Image (cartoon, rainbow, N blue to C red):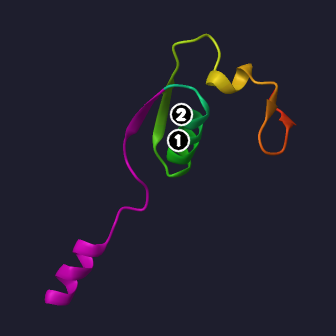
Amino acid sequence: MADSAQGKALAAPARPVGRVMVVGGGIAGMQSALDLANSGYYVYLVENDPAIGGLMSQLDKTFPTNDCAM
C-alpha cells in the first residue's frame, strides 16, 4: 500500500496547466516567452512599444560575430 501511495505522489501531470504573462518584448522577454510556450504554458507577451525587440532592434551589428542585427 505504501508503494502505490508513493507512486501517486511522485507522478507529475503530463503538461503544465496555466497561463503566464511576460512583460517586455526585448530579447530576454521573447526568449522567456518561447521557453515557457515550449514547456506547455499559454503565454501572453506584453510590450509597451509598437514593436518588439527592445534595444536589440536599434543595433546594426552584434558582438562577437559582427552579424547584422536586422
Question: Can you identify the residue that label 1 sits on?
Answer: 32
The type of residue carrying mark 2 is Gly
Q: Secondary structure at mark 1?
A: helix
Q: Quadrant of residue 49?
A: top right
| For the residues bearing labels 1 and 2, Cβ distance under 8 angstroms | yes
Can you say whether 31 is above or below 54 in the image?
Answer: below
Magenta stretch contains residue 15? yes
Q: Is residue 39 left or right of residue 62?
A: left
Farthest front residue in view: 64
- On whether residue 43 falls in the magenta region, the answer is no
**Residue found at x 21% / y 81%:** 6
Label of residue 49 in the image: none
Q: Residue furthest top?
A: 50
Q: Position of residue 46 (x, y in %)?
A: 49, 22
Residue count near mark 1 (Cα–Cα under 10 Å), binned few <14, some 14–19, many ≥20: some
Tell me how far mark 1 sits from mark 2, CA to CA.
5 Å
**Which stretch appears magenta?**
1-23
Image position of 23 (left or right of 61): left
| Residue 1 at least partly seen | no
Identify the residue shown where x is 21% and y is 84%: 4
Kind of residue indicated by mark 1: Ser
Q: Residue at x 69, y 27 (%)?
A: 56
In the foreground, 61 or 40: 61
Query: Residue 24 placed where, x, y %?
Result: 50, 25
Crowd around label 2: few <14 · some 14–19 · many ≥20 (10 Å) = some
| Quadrant in which the C terminus is drawn | top right
Q: Name the residue carrying label 2.
A: 29
- Measuring from the top left, give residue 12's x and y in whole percent: 34, 66
Question: Can residue 47 be seen by looking at this rendering?
Answer: yes
Residue name at image x 26 percent, y 80 percent: 7
